[in-house]
Image (cartoon, helix red, strand yellow):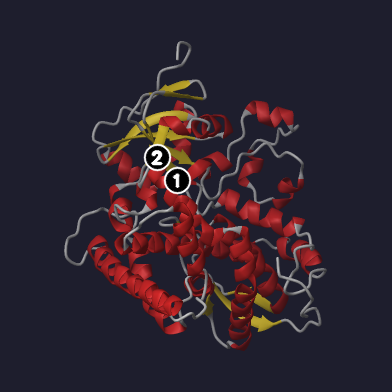
Amino acid sequence: MVNARPLPSTGAVTGVVEALSFLRDADFAQRRFERYGNVYQTRLLGQSMVFVRGGAAINDLLAQPDATEGWWPESVRQLLGNRSLANRNGSDHKARRRVVGQLFSAAALRRYSPAIVGLVDDLAGELQQSTGTIALVDRMRRFAFAVIATVVLGLDEEARDALFTDFEIWTRALFSVPLAIPGSPFARALAARTRLLGRLQQVLEQARQSAAAGLPLSGGLDLLSGGLDEAGLPLTDDDLVEQLLLLLFAGYETTASSLSCLMLAVLQEPDLLPWLQDELNGLSWPPVAEQATPRLNAVVLEVMRLNPPVGGFFRRTTRSVVLEGVEVPAGCVVQVALAASNRYRSTAASADIGDDSGDDLERFRPQRHLAADDGLTLLPFGGGERVCLGKALAELEIRLMAVGLLKQVRFSLEPDQDLGLQLIPSPSPRSGLLVTAQPIQSSSRMEPPGDPA
């Protein structure tokens, strides 16, 4: 701490003006980073907040997990619930994370893959038969929810559809003002949460009845119960349903955002699809693990670099820490600004990779990720020991959806729509990404032996 620099501050007192700027200005953090440096403090509606960007500061933060704890805004804490592992810290958090993580293990993903392929084919079939304008964002959101609700939790279509409506209401208010005024988004979200927990309680009870009758469980709930036994955690039903609610969010929102932004890039960037199609033409459907997809991987990384599904993540310091040479006192809420970080490369890093292009990071250029070292620190799903639980499932879904749809369906953008992104709770095209669709007549669709990747 001896040589650490003091924490720069914007000087905001109440944070009202800062909060308005935060909500209205997509470059809020970027402008202040340019003025105050990569670590600075401000205030948003009375809440002191330290913003950080760049690999050096982020790596310093993640390297000191014993000096930080998880933190969420009050609206998120209330809507997730105080039993949710997202709101827990220390050994309590780690034990529950190990249990819930069983649903996203490598073995679980192998189990889910054939069913996800089936859902991709179902969606491709619906799109091929459509004759009018399609809001592709809505289809992506429903697909992502179907995967986590049906493939992972084992819900039937009727139960899944009942959950979806309430889940959308709940999700939209996660980062709202936490005032339960009748008719407000937050009040509607609290009511939706009560209904969601009731339905998830029914899911648990049905799973118990099936297990007692010796019937196989749909989805992965048997992995969850097995993890509970292994960890020796005597969780109550109220505790379990809050973990299931978190699972729905972890496996849904980030995936839906990434899928929507991926399809937007494919349709907006004129040179992207031909470049990507060269690789897709060499893939079978469903793809197998042995088939490499470096171009697709690079496209996905570039999409999530420019529009990370998690715009930032929070930590609260439990003791003083030094981030890129700046001292951050104990008790500070730190927000890692991922979108700003992904557009920033230090002068030293640029020199190391021979890049002096300046504004290159504002361009959509997936080829940068084919290099051995592009000098970037990308954490699209957060980082450290609290990285998004649904990360592995999201990556699998995105790959399968991209290959399956782009090999079977040709899309055309409808004119006169707003392709700008709404950012809360996750980036998504404002007009819903309106398209028309046509089937691709191809002999490349085949059923190879082996498990899909």
Q: Position of residue 142 (x, y in %)?
A: 49, 74
Q: Is residue 207 left or right of residue 13?
A: right
Give whichever of 237, 159 is nearer the camera.
Answer: 237
Which residue matches tag 1? 94
Q: Secondary structure at mark 1?
A: helix
Q: Is residue 305 left or right of residue 426?
A: right
Q: Where on the picture, by quarter, is residue 229?
A: bottom left
Residue at the location (53% across, 79% down)? 134
Q: Where on the picture, by quarter, is residue 452?
A: bottom right
Q: Is residue 276 above or below residue 70?
A: below
How far apart marks 1 and 2 lie (CA) works out to 6 Å
Please indicate, yes or no, whether residue 378 appears anywhere in the rendered image: yes
Q: Secondary structure at mark 2?
A: helix
Circle 1 crowding by C-alpha within 10 Å: few under 14, some 14–19, many from 20: some
Circle 2 crowding by C-alpha within 10 Å: few under 14, some 14–19, many from 20: few
Please indicate, yes or no, whether residue 429 appears anywhere in the rendered image: no
Q: Position of residue 387 (x, y in %)?
A: 51, 47
Which residue matches tag 2? 90
Q: Label 2 is placed on what type of residue? A: Gly
Q: Is residue 321 above or below residue 265?
A: above
- Residue 425: which numbered mark, if any? none
Q: Label 1 is placed on what type of residue? A: Lys
Q: Position of residue 40 (x, y in %)?
A: 42, 29
Residue at the location (50% across, 20% down)? 325
Q: Where on the picture, by quarter, is residue 245?
A: bottom left
Q: Is residue 314 above or below residue 215?
A: above
